[in-house]
Amino acid sequence: MTRDVSPVQSNTPIAEAAAKMAEARFGGLPVLDDSGALTGIVTEDDLLRRVELGTSPHHPAWFSFFRSPGLAAADYVRAHTRTSEDIMTPDPSVVG
């Protein structure tokens, strides 16, 4: 753990958040809203399934019978979105 964190805003582009994470050698960054309140965290795992990287999930057609439409829609949004807010893990548990 480190005290010198480098947060990103909720509207920060994913590419910028990824570059910031790589530069600082962090596995995750806190995401703040416009008022500076913590709203979530972006981790390396959140960056794995991306269309521009060719790592978005590909499922066979029969797989859709076992998944709800809501889950499929959520996967699509996470793979195609452009801001940190859309891929972050919301409401993280924090320790003072």
Image (cartoon, rainbow, N blue to C red):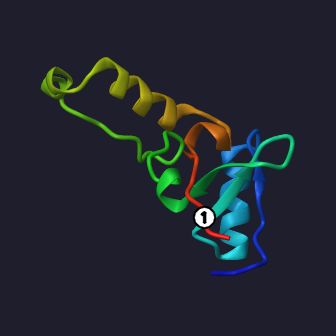
Picture residue at 72% right of the left edge, 74% below the top: 24
Give x and y (percent) for residue 86: 60, 36
Give the number of marks: 1
Callout 1 amino acid: Gly
Estimate the x, y position of residue 49 in percent, counting from the top left.
44, 46
Mark 1 lies on residue: 28
Number of residues whose C-alpha sits closer than 10 Å to that of mark 1, classed few (under 14), some (14–19) or many (20 or more): many
Identified at 12% across, 24% down, the residue is 62
Question: Residue sitting at 29 percent across and 37 percent down?
Answer: 58
> In the picture provided, is 81 more to the left or to the right than 61?
right
- Quadrant of the image for the C terminus? bottom right
* Quarter containing the N terminus: bottom right
The residue positioned farthest toward the right in the image shown: 35
In which image quadrant can residue 83 be found? Answer: top right
Camera-side residue of 18 and 90: 90
Residue closest to the eye, 59 or 26: 26
The picture places residue 68, in percent across and down from the top left corner, at 26, 22
Q: Nearer the viewer, residue 49 or 41?
A: 41
Q: Residue furthest front?
A: 96
Q: Nearer the viewer, residue 2 or 11?
A: 2
Residue at figure coordinates x 41%, y 47% from the top left: 55
Left or right of 60, for residue 33? right
Q: Quadrant of residue 54?
A: top left
Residue 13 spot, x, y in % from top left: 72, 43
